Image (cartoon, grey):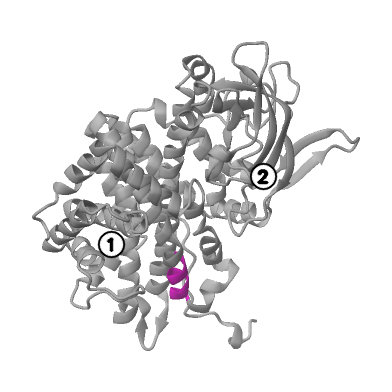
Amino acid sequence: MAASTHTVTNQAPPLVGYDVYAADRALVEAVERHVDAGLLDEVRGELSALGRAAGSAQLQEWGAQANENPPKLRTHDRYGNRIDEVEFHPAWHRLLGKGVSAGLTAAWTRPAGHVRRAAAFLVWTQVEAGNGCPLSMTHAAVPALRTDPELAAEWEPRLTSMIYDRDLRPARLKAGALFGMGMTEKQGGSDVRANTTSARPLAEDGTYELTGHKWFCSAPMSDGFLVLAQAPGGLTCFLVPRVLEDGTRNVFLIQRLKEKLGNRSNASSEVEFDGTWARRVGEEGRGVRTIIEMVAATRLDCVLGSAGLMRQAVAQAVHHCTYREAFGGKLIDKPLMRNVLADLALESEAATTLALRLAAAYDDGSEQERAFLRLAVPAAKYWVTKRCAPVAVEASECLGGNGYVEESGMPRLVRESPLNSIWEGAGNIQALDVLRALQREPQALNAYLQEVGRARGADHRLDGAIKNLLTELADLDGIEARARRVVERLALVLQGALLVQYAPPEVADAFCASRLGGDWGTVFGTLPHTLNLASVVERARPVS
């Protein structure tokens, strides 16, 4: 019989056995807003099935196992032959296979493909974010390959397949394939035009031999990679297959795996090319232009990934406070804790609403929406990804000491939270990209202003923020030094405009009062006390 001192009381039960999708009201409403009615039942069923899987004890255990057992590099076999393979825990393969079968690489070929994939990616990130990398790279490779119709015809059916085939063999023999990417080099980082990897033309038209080093190569066990190298005509995009048509391994020397702060289940590598066979994608000297659509798609995934991490952090915090008692009552009913939870919930909902709006623009595909994305994607990537870390840290604090213990899962969210702000172009890169769009593509700003203009007159604080933004944009002197300030305002005004149109009044009111109206402190939990914070928190509670 257990001693009375070991009786467990006042502990929140684990957040398990629920539908991660259906429990997220902001996400459900965004999907219903952006998917045609005739397709909605199919999409709802698909996302709820994934949501139930994501909330199950089994998949949560797989996520923990994949994180606790990081990949291992095997450069040689027992006989001394160079093999350059990465060994993953079985849970990694189960999760990656589930992600592929759920359509996370199939957006380009399905109706409402980007919205349904975006919602699924946001849900799936909450299980284990690491396997999102190969899913994202594979999805994003499609528009880059479409610059070469022959390559697209060959590879796109494999990349958009919903079959996971992990074996290294010629792609023509596989029912599905994954892609990685190698752009940055140790001497250049984000300045890819400083790349030194060289590409020497071979006799067969469009084929080259690469020599060089890539400082970051994503998902090194993929079937193919898009890389940048210096051809005779300048920086060019290339497709590097892992296995050649005759079944031999291409020269793809994995030098080491990166020891990362978070994202530990995923293999990020340094690789060397030494006479590596490659096929040109697009024209010589236009490598950046060729690969830029891939970069844009991965940046949207950074927004989605951060929104997913924030949602899980908020769900865990609200769930804990629903059950935990202190000072004579439930934590969720304490005015100060309610203020913190509501503030976190606002950040999460604003991120989700913006991310799904961007995905809907991809599905639309019109010239107007493409112009909108040109400005909105880097602005959202800058702002949403930067909000992820403070949200994760504050949400962990809501669990008290429990949130600092690995078993809670919160430390994994905290370690993961800075990643999306750094990858695919860190904050300054995004800010400068926004400036380029403002200075060179007036149609991008016009599309943005038309978008936020739909909400004018609905909230005086939003109207004031739009006016101040226009004043800021009217003065371009020294704008590079002000770039972060400008981009932050662009993102906040866009989030406010979307919430005013689509969120419940209490959510829009709290967002506009704090983020746009200035009635806010410098940390979470400083919302005006006169707001309807209980309704904001209840909306964020993970009950389905």
Q: Which residue is mark 1?
A: 539
Q: Is residue 425 magenta?
A: no
- At a point 36% along the width and 88% down the height, the residue shown is 328
Q: How many discs mark residues in the rendered view?
A: 2
Q: In which quadrant of the rendered image does the N terminus lie?
A: bottom right
- At a point 56% along the width and 51% down the height, the residue shown is 58
Mark found first going from the N terminus, 1 or 2:
2
Q: Is residue 161 visible?
A: no
In the figure, 403 relative to 186: above or below? below
Mark 2 surroundings: few (<14), some (14-19) or many (≥20) residues within 10 A? many
Q: Of all residues shown, which one is farthest toward the top?
A: 204
Q: Is residue 293 left or right of residue 211?
A: left
Majority secondary structure in the magenta region = helix
**Foreground disc of the pair 1, 2:** 2
Q: Nearer the viewer, residue 158 or 244?
A: 244
Q: Of all residues shown, which one is farthest toward the right?
A: 79
Q: Nearer the viewer, residue 503 or 447?
A: 447
Residue contact at pointers 1 and 2, CB within 8 angstroms: no
Read off the magenta span.
392-399
Image coordinates of residue 306 in percent, x first then y, are: 43, 54
Amino acid carrying label 2: it is: Ser
Image coordinates of residue 377 in percent, x first then y, are: 35, 44
Q: Which residue is mark 2?
A: 269
Image coordinates of residue 170 in percent, x first then y, are: 67, 21
Q: Is residue 331 visible?
A: yes
- At a point 73% along the width and 19% down the height, the residue shown is 247
Image coordinates of residue 353 in percent, x first then y, are: 29, 50
Q: Secondary structure at mark 1?
A: helix
Amino acid carrying label 1: it is: Arg
| Disc ID at residue 272 | none
